[in-house]
Amino acid sequence: MKYILALCGALVLNAVANLSMKVGTQAGGLGDNGPVGALKFIIGSPILLLGLICFACNAFLYMFALQSKSLQISLAYPIMVGGGYAIISVAAYFLPSLQERLSPGQWVGVAMILAGVITVAVMTPSELPAAAVGEQT
């Protein structure tokens, strides 16, 4: 259970990181003054720093989840990518600072992606290979 919770935490942190960076870079200026200017721009932007911190925490939680013998990467990765896409798309639609619009076709696509992730999760065998049974934590 702790690995599933870590995966869910990583998923949310990934979405927050992406949304933070989008909001933080909307005014532009990140690449205007070379690498040193970009670093100053990031350090001077709390929202960009939040995004970077969320990415770092996301990576840690995702690695923690992947160490599970029972959580297959063929399940974990679709949850991260598909779930992340859905969260980011819906959040970008509702966030006043982004106000992205999704067409009806895009809403259908988001629903299909979520249906695909759920299908992968439901159809993934829950039994462990014989060699890993003694190693489950």
Image (tube, rainbow, N blue to C red):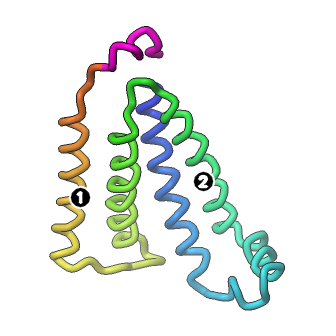
| For residue 1, side relative to residue 16 (left or right) | left
Residue matched to label 2: 54
Residue closest to the eye, 134 or 26? 134
| For residue 44, side relative to residue 22 (left or right) | right
- The nearer-to-camera label among 1 and 2 is 1
Residue 71, above or below 33: above
Distance between mark 1 and mark 2 Cα atoms: 24 Å
Residue 12, above or below 100: above
Name which residue type carries label 1: Ile
Q: Residue 57: x, y in percent?
A: 61, 46
Quarter of the figure that contains the N terminus: top left
Tell me if mark 2 has few (under 14), some (14-19) or many (20+) residues whose alpha carbon lies within 10 angstroms of its own.
Answer: many
Q: Of label 1 and label 2, which has the lower sequence position?
A: 2
Q: Which dot marks residue 113?
A: 1
| For residue 66, side relative to residue 48 (left or right) | left
Residue drawn 63% across and 87% down? 28
**Which residues make up the magenta segment?**
128-137
Quarter occupied by residue 109: bottom left
Residue 69, above or below 56: above
Residue drawn 53% across and 74% down? 22
Name which residue type carries label 2: Cys
